[in-house]
Image (cartoon, rainbow, N blue to C red):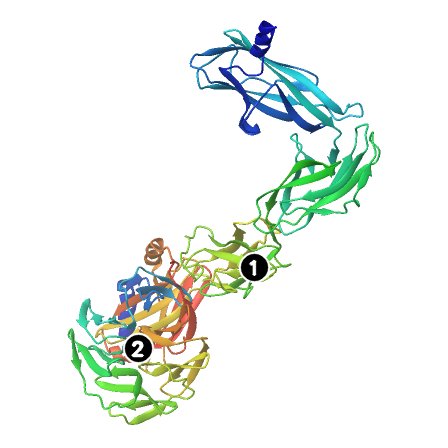
């Protein structure tokens, strides 16, 4: 009862703060990074915050953008190998793999530091959590989840061989004309996304799915999974 | 004898200082003692332009210009008489010949005198000649008309379709006419012409008839051509004119992927025609949103391609399928505001223009994400992402439960109406919100295991379900 009284009293002191919900940051067809606001299937985009983005990952704490020759995070640009990047954000920074050079690096405190990689196969996805890295790699005709030493942890059934978006609690990959959201408990949900070619982490609970001429977003929060199209700004 | 010859020489058509020529639209050529208009058909107005040029070194005053003779007229002079003609200058004037077409028209040679007097005293005399020949009289059937200038006018024609004009040739003269040819240019075709040679009897007896046909190509505008009738070896030419216009779009249909819509959806719209388009066509598909009473516009209600409320559409000739912004359909967002979404077509004439309107009904608050957190000591936090398409949210209730699932007291209520109202007043892109509610707590915070939140708006209530503090 005592707890209840204080809760009741606290209602009068309860602070209600209302803000416009932001899903994350998308990369539009022109390579501009744009904040996305609203709710699923009813979103608007804001003016670009970064041009020339070729890879991206955003979480609740911010975004890491890969430009052609630099990585941008926290408002700071750091020279980086050319080309795309696979980015796995964690609480302290990000683990980044550069396919063009085969380099694995750690982004932390405004610096890129090489990380020794024991992975010999083609890396198509990665994630980092609490200092533990996991990778999606191609082995033969299959895509496997492996630890930082290359030991197999899981296989992704039906993966078409393209990029894999790895996040806490699951993976997302292309299987034919579908995008598969697979949870750590092996349950999976498929979404129709014809022509899907890749992914960016849009935000904490959303992934951007790249397709010819348009992008989708997939809401990944358990019980709220949904696919919808992202608006493209006027040209 | 010598003096008479000298006087006759002074009255010739041109003297050493003044020279008479044809000019202007007639073309330039020196005029001698006579000038022939040639063969002129009855009912035809033939005009020749003459110029008097001063080739001397002193000015000459043109006193009078006169024409006298049956069928010939002087419509006017390009200057006021008496006219001081300076050296190297010229004075222009037209002379017309017209004999009305009628059974009484006398074919043959007509003559007149053209006399120009000057100061210093002198006179230019020219004999004007014209041979009147019998000519046809044309009549046309509606919807064609004959203009006052004698042109055949089809009027405004729908491009891509064939159009006919029936022509009747009458011979009102006293002589029979022999038709030996009918030709048309400018894309006009002759149909049902009589076999040549064809004799058209005199004095209004039944003549010949034929049809002119044209099928203007798509995107045709002004169309012109010539009709030539050859009668007794003489070509009679008539201008033909028409104005093409592409046909309107015929009965387009707008179809939604779903007829029952709600907020926060992405349906698509497509367009088709009842019958194939005659010509390539294009226009605009417009989306309009009318919010329910008192609610603001919602900028998230747009077509996703280009984030706009207007998209171009095109349809190819011969097709019933319409492309919208290059695709077979266009996806749009229904936003998060109650109201009405309607679609219209503009930019092109349309027969049976479609009117498509769909309602986005008011609904209870929609909850997208909800979470409860006890990570901050002494504080319980609830975070809800959702939208309220009535913009009337405010009342919330919180039902707390302990680790055994037992309610902790009664549900507590709070009214955040003013907070929501202030927030919505600043929104232009819908009613989506992220609300964070914090409860200061004293006691064993861990005893509070779950909370279930109910949100109320004018359309009803919505629940988060049981949220576990973590």
Q: Position of residue B185 (x, y in %)?
A: 64, 44
User: What's the distance in space between the residues labelled 2 and 1, CA to CA?
Assistant: 60 Å
Tag 1 subunit: B
The numbered mark at residue B469 is: 2
Q: Residue A10's x, y, as percent? A: 27, 66
The part of the image, by quadrant, that contains residue B2 is: top right
**Residue B355: image location, x then y, percent:** 57, 53
Q: Residue furthest front?
A: B1
From the image, tell me which residue sits under label 1: B316
Q: Residue at x 35, y 76 (%)?
A: A199
Locate residue A43 relative to residue B275 in the image: left or right.
Answer: left
Neighbourhood count class around disc 2 (C-alpha, 10 Å): few under 14, some 14–19, many 20 upward: some
* Residue lying at 77% horizontally and 47% vertically, measured from the top left: B192
Q: Quadrant of the C terminus of chain A?
A: bottom left
Q: Is residue B317 left or right of residue A138?
A: right
Give the mark nearer the N terminus: 2 vs 1. 1
């Amino acid at each position: 009862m005592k707890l209840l009284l204080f809760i009741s009293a606290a209602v009068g002191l309860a602070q209600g703060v209302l803000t416009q919900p932001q899903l994350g940051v998308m990369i539009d067809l022109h390579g501009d990074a744009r904040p996305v606001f609203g709710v699923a299937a009813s979103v608007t985009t804001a003016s670009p915050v970064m041009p020339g983005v070729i890879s991206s990952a955003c979480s609740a704490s911010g975004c890491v953008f890969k430009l052609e020759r630099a990585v941008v995070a926290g408002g700071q640009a750091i020279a980086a190998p050319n080309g795309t990047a696979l980015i796995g954000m964690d609480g302290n920074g990000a683990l980044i793999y550069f396919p063009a050079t085969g380099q694995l690096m750690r982004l932390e405190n405004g610096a890129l530091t090489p990380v020794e990689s024991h992975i010999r196969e083609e890396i198509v996805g990665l994630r980092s959590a609490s200092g533990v890295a996991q990778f999606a790699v191609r082995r033969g005709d299959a895509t496997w989840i492996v630890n930082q030493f290359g030991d197999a942890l899981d296989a992704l059934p039906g993966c078409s061989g393209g990029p894999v978006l790895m996040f806490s609690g699951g993976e997302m990959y292309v299987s034919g004309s579908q995008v598969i959201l697979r949870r750590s408990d092996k349950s999976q949900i498929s979404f129709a996304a014809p022509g899907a070619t890749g992914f960016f982490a849009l935000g904490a609970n959303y992934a951007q799915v790249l397709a010819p001429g348009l992008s989708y977003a997939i809401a990944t929060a358990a019980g709220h999974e949904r696919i919808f199209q992202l608006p493209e700004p006027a040209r | 004898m010598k003096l008479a010859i000298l006087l006759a020489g002074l009255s010739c058509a041109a003297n050493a200082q003044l020279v008479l020529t044809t000019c202007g639209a007639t073309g330039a050529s020196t005029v001698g003692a006579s000038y022939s208009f040639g063969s002129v058909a009855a009912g035809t107005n033939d005009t020749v332009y003459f110029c008097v040029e001063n080739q001397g070194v002193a000015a000459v005053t043109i006193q009078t210009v006169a024409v006298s003779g049956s069928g010939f007229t002087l419509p006017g002079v390009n200057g006021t008489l008496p006219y001081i003609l300076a050296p190297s200058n010229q004075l222009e004037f037209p002379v017309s010949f017209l004999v009305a077409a009628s059974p009484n028209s006398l074919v043959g040679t007509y003559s007149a005198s053209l006399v120009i007097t000057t100061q210093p005293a002198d006179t230019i005399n020219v004999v004007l000649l014209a041979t009147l020949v019998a000519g046809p009289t044309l009549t046309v059937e509606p919807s064609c008309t004959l203009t006052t200038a004698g042109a055949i006018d089809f009027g405004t024609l729908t491009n891509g379709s064939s159009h006919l004009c029936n022509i009747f040739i009458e011979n009102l003269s006293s002589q029979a006419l022999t038709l030996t040819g009918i030709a048309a240019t400018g894309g006009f075709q002759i149909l049902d012409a009589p076999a040549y040679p064809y004799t058209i009897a005199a004095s209004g007896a039944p003549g010949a008839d034929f049809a002119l046909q044209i099928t203007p190509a798509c995107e045709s505008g002004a169309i012109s051509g010539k009709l030539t009738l050859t009668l007794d070896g003489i070509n009679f030419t008539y201008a033909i004119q028409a104005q093409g216009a592409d046909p309107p779009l015929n009965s387009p249909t707008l179809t939604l992927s779903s007829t029952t819509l709600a907020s926060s959806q992405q349906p698509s719209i497509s367009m088709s025609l009842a019958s194939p388009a005659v010509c390539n066509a294009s226009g605009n598909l417009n989306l309009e949103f009318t919010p329910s009473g008192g609610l603001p516009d919602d900028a998230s209600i747009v077509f996703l391609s280009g984030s706009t409320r207007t998209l171009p559409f095109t349809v190819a000739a011969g097709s019933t399928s319409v492309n919208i912004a290059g695709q077979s359909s266009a996806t749009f967002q229904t936003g998060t505001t109650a109201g009405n979404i309607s679609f219209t077509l503009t930019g092109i004439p349309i027969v049976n223009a479609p009117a498509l309107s769909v309602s986005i009904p008011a609904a209870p608050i929609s909850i997208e994400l909800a979470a409860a957190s006890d990570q901050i000591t002494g504080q319980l936090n609830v975070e809800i992402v959702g939208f309220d398409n009535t913009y009337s949210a405010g009342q919330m209730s919180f039902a707390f439960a302990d680790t055994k699932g037992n309610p902790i007291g009664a549900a507590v209520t709070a009214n955040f109406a003013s907070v929501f109202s202030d927030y919505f007043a600043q929104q232009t892109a819908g009613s989506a919100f992220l609300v964070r509610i914090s409860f200061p707590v004293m006691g064993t915070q861990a005893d509070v295991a779950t909370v279930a939140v109910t949100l109320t708006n004018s359309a009803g209530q919505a629940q988060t379900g049981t949220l576990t503090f973590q």
